[in-house]
Image: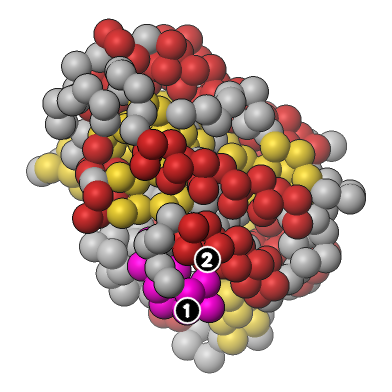
Amino acid sequence: MNHYQQNRTRLANITGGLIVIPANYKMEMSLDTAYPFRQDSNFYYLTGVDEPGWILVIDKNNGDYLIAPKKSTQETIFDGENNFENISGISAVKNIYEHREGWEKLKKQIKTASQIYLPVSSSKIDWQIAPNPSNISLTRKVKAIKTSINIKDIKPNLAKMRSIKQDYEIDLLQKAVDSTCETLRNVRNNLKNFQNESEVEAAITGKFAIQYGVCHAYEPIVASSKNATTIHYIKNDSEFRNGDLLLIDAGAYQNNYCGDISRTFSIGGDPSTRQRDIHEAVQSVLTKTLEILKPGISWRDYVAKVEKFMGEELVKLKLISSSESKKSIRKYFPHLISHSLGLDVHDPINFEDPISQNMVITVEPGIYVPEEGIGVRIEEDVLITKNGNKVLSSDLDTEL
Ligand SMILES: [Mn+2]
């Protein structure tokens, strides 16, 4: 069975009833020009369709269908026709309707239903990120058709499903990780040829595009020297100085799955003792963390153990005086040790569930010391196996 069809069947078996999931819209970048299109990952997980404006209806009893985006004659001339045959082939959804016809069918179903599952989103802007309006506008439309309908959020069910990777997903993730490893290895082997961060970024972008036909899963971080102490530094425009460290955090976006790997390299010259010590401390936390990472451990216990490992290293580095103070540890290690990885670089997951077999998560300890201008992170992509874990990114060594 087609993977997407299988995902729809599994979801419908959990919830039953009527489920409606919209594709993302294109987002305005500049007057009537859109940003590069990025599909909603839930919609992609259930259809494999990578085009804007579609709507998926999952109905266990009466069959699934897709509603095509509305396209004017003018839009068809510019963007091409909706190719139903192609969409049906990818998604294994047999019934595809034109916009008006599909909505008439859906309207009738909404009017007779007492309950409907939708991806419920808020319009809240977090970290200056405005959500794609497709979920919000669908919810509004459904309410306008039937005010009294009981709307249930489908996202927690999808998060649960998506956090446990199937074999086909693990294969695709491994491909994205392999391309990222090979690209970062290539950068490291040619480091002496780069003068600045933007040249490194261009080399990564170029290798992704030319060798693998892919783009970045997220804006890459290419941070030399003290820039690496800004966790989400993406300006990538500083000149290199001999003796600096270079932190690279990048991932290929391949077959809609994300790689997410960080390494810290030394730019020319011998690293200083302090640079080596901090790098070794991060490496040590990584090794200890991988030793405890196996199915059954709760996120709470996992995070507490990692904080203990990190605290011990920070004391040895004389950055803090006691490994007991969580607050002082977090001053030098302010981000999560792990996040789920999949169709989204920060894939949805329920942190109340224990770490389980076939989850794919990052493990990314880092130490950032702004007052010394040193930032080190090592990030691996890790599959949780039956008895432990497998580092998918082990092909790229972690040496300074
Ligand atoms: Mn990450």
Residue 216 position in % (x across, y down):
40, 31
Q: Where, by quadrant of the figure, is residue 264 drawn? A: top left
Where 263 falls versus 156 (above or below)?
A: above
Q: Residue at x 37, y 42 (%)?
A: 274
Q: Is residue 16 above or below residue 280?
A: below
Element carrying mark 2: helix
Q: Secondary structure at mark 1?
A: loop
Q: Are marks 2 and 1 in contact (CB under 8 Å)?
A: yes
User: From where the camera sits, is residue 281 visible?
Assistant: yes
Q: Is residue 241 magenta?
A: no
Camera-side residue of 331 and 124: 331
Say which mark, if any, is on residue 325: 1
Instruction: Name the residue: 46% across, 29% down.
Output: 400
Which residues fall within the magenta stretch?
A: 322-332
Q: Is 89 placed left or right of 346 in the picture?
A: right
- Residue ID for mark 2: 311
Q: Which picture quadrant has residue 376?
A: top left
**Which percent across, then down, holds residue 151?**
56, 81
**Amino acid tagged 1:** Ser
Q: Residue at x 43, y 11 (%)?
A: 189
